[in-house]
């Protein structure tokens, strides 16, 4: 899958879309995950640090928008992170879209046995939750791809931002995040709205899915990781020179700005 990794890596750094591989390169889903992780290895080799994981297609609306039905798992690096209120260079992206999300954070002390397990034992070690947004930017022309294509392309991952963290699984309580109102605004106009319940019925289910997919395909899972649960709505085109804000009721907001052309 080295040639696939090369093409995708060049498309991202040169800000130039490529043709999808479906129809020209034989690629199984396992091959696609190997290409995804191969691309992350290259980024690590250039000094990036892996800081988390991201689910895709966890909401029916997103899956329908892209014509794909399986839940998928990508990787987040430190270079993909934008500070809350931070600026994103729009010229560095091909055809970006933005999604309203929920982020979870793992405890810094998850035991190794729990990190390696495919089951739900991770949940007590999910200590924080926050409003989040993800910028996706498919490296494929017209944002169109097969399931294998999008997996190889690190599930279209580009950037992400996280708002203020809230304690999630405390000593006595666990926050119920199963039905919180979500709103995505671009320059104060509501561009998408919905509920966190659109994310697998409860975003917590994304953590279970992340664990399952990570152990099946070999993604790293480390203490302190951020896990994006997946978009609650269809993705929206991200314009230049704009302010984007995601509000999740009870969790607060997160904002980024995009540069002018
Ligand atoms: C794939 C990424 C989907 C989500 O939150 O559902 C995703 C894509 O739609 O290009 O990140
Ligand atoms: Mg997403």
Image (spheres, rainbow, N blue to C red):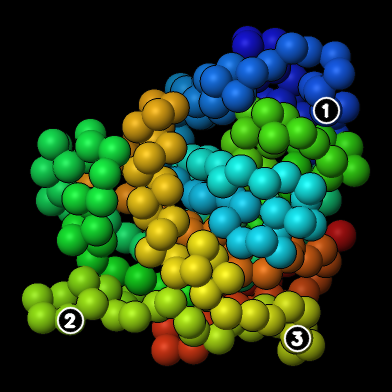
Q: Position of residue 162 (x, y in %)?
A: 47, 67
For label 2, the residue is 173
Which residue is at 67% across, 46% downward? 69
Q: Point out the frontmost of discs 3 and 2.
A: 2
Q: Is residue 53 visible?
A: yes
- Judge left or right: residue 6 versus residue 76: right
Residue at disc 1, secondary structure? loop
Q: Which image quarter holds the C terminus?
A: bottom right
Q: Position of residue 50 (x, y in %)?
A: 40, 39
Identify the residue under disc 3: 190
- The secondary structure type at the circle numbered 3 is strand
Q: What is the distance, in whole Å, between disc 3 and disc 1 at their CAs? A: 32 Å
Residue 71 screen position, x and y as percent: 56, 46
Look at mark 1 in the image and give the residue it sits on.
20
Residue 238 is at least partly visible in this image: no
Number of other residues with Cα within 10 Å of mark 3, as a class: few under 14, some 14 to 19, many 20 or more: few
Quarter residue 259 falls in: bottom right
Spatial CA distance of label 3 from label 2 is 33 Å
Residue toward you, 182 or 52? 182
Using residue 229 as the reference point, say whether residue 133 is left or right of it. right
N-term mark: 3 or 1: 1
Q: Residues within 10 Å of mark 1 (few under 14, many from 20)?
A: many
Query: Distance of mark 2 from mark 1, alpha carbons?
Result: 46 Å
Whether 245 is drawn above or below 21: the answer is: below
């Amino acid at each position: 899958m080295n040639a696939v990794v090369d093409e995708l890596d060049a498309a991202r750094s040169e800000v130039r879309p490529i043709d999808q591989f479906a129809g020209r390169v034989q690629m199984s889903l396992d091959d696609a995950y190997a290409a995804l992780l191969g691309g992350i290895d290259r980024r690590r080799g250039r000094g990036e640090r892996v800081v988390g994981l991201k689910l895709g297609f966890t909401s029916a609306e997103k899956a329908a928008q892209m014509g794909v039905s399986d839940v998928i798992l990508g990787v987040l690096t430190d270079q993909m992170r934008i500070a809350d209120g931070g600026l994103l260079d729009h010229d560095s992206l091909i055809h970006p879209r933005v999604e309203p999300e929920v982020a979870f954070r793992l405890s810094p002390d998850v035991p190794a046995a729990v990190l390696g397990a495919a089951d739900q034992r991770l949940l007590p070690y999910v200590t924080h939750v926050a409003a989040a947004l993800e910028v996706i930017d498919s490296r494929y022309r017209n944002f169109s791809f097969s399931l294998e294509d999008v997996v190889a392309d690190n599930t279209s991952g580009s950037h992400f931002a996280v708002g203020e963290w809230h304690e999630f699984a405390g000593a006595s309580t666990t926050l119920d995040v199963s039905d919180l109102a979500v709103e995505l605004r671009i320059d104060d106009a509501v561009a998408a709205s919905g509920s966190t319940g659109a994310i697998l019925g409860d975003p917590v289910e994304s953590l279970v899915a992340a664990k399952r997919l990570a152990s099946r395909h070999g993604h790293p899972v480390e203490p302190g990781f951020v896990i994006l649960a997946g978009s609650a709505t269809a993705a929206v085109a991200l314009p230049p020179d704009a302010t984007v804000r995601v509000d999740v009721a009870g969790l607060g907001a997160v904002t980024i700005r995009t540069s002018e052309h």
